Image (spheres, helix red, strand yellow):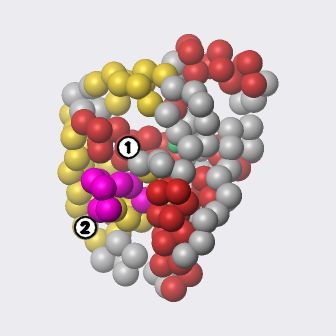
Amino acid sequence: MATRKIVKIGSEKLRKISKPVVEFDEELGLLLDDMKTTMVERRGVGIAGVQVGVLRRVIVIELEEGKYLEVINPEILKTKGKVKRNEGCLSVPGFYTDVERPKYVKIKAYDRHGKEFEFEAEDFIARCVCHEIDHLNGVLFVDYTDEGKNYKTELGVE
Ligand code: NI
């Protein structure tokens, strides 16, 4: 397992749409292991493939200390409610802003072996799931708020 370099805001890569995983092979397993290692080392709670430079629809989320969820090719089936909370991102170091997200989310996805599963989450984990799925679609949390938009302007990035 290796730590990979985090792609930071300003890189065009973060704005690209990631492609679905088609082969559930050893390389995918390695990628997921490296993503987890990288996330833990950087004290993140979620990470998407694009953040380590791989434009595939893969996510790792920390559910609790030492317990991780691997999410491949996720699809949102249902959301409920709205909650506004402070949010950050490994690709946007040192910046935080309050973002409105669903209180509840239900997704369908695949594990590293290609087995389909459904997953429901509320509050903090639901927020993580939505934030990471955004990454797969080239969206960053700074896009949602005036504070975030001002920050992008300050940095001179899109
Ligand atoms: Ni992020």
Q: Is residue 65 magenta?
A: yes
Q: Which mark is residue 117?
A: 2
Q: Is residue 102 left or right of residue 148?
A: left
Residue pictured at 42% horizontal, 65% vertical:
72
Whether tag 2 and tag 1 are in contact, CB under 8 A, the answer is: no
Residue 38: say if magenta: no
Residue at the spot 23% in from the left edge and 61% down from the top edge = 118
* Placement of the N terminus among the 4 image quadrants: bottom right
Q: Amino acid at mark 1?
A: Cys
> Is disc 2 surrounded by few (<14), some (14 to 19) or many (20+) residues within 10 Å?
few
Q: Count how many numbered circles sit on residues in the image.
A: 2
Query: Marks 2 and 1, Cα distance to the nearest angstrom?
Result: 18 Å
Numbered disc in front, either 2 or 1: 1
Residue 51 vs 96, above or below: the answer is below
Q: Which is nearer the eye, 105 or 53?
A: 53
Residue located at (54% from left, 51% from top): 42
Where is residue 11 drawn, in percent x and y? 74, 44
Q: Which one is nearer the viewer's eye here, 57 or 88?
A: 88
SS of the residue under disc 2? strand
Rendered location of residue 82, percent (x, y) = 27, 25
Q: Secondary structure at mark 1?
A: helix
Image quadrant in which you'd find residue 94: top right
Q: Which residues are magenta?
A: 60-67
Q: Residue at 49% x, 34% y: name it.
A: 88
From the top left corner, tell me how far across and down residue 111 is, in percent: 35, 72
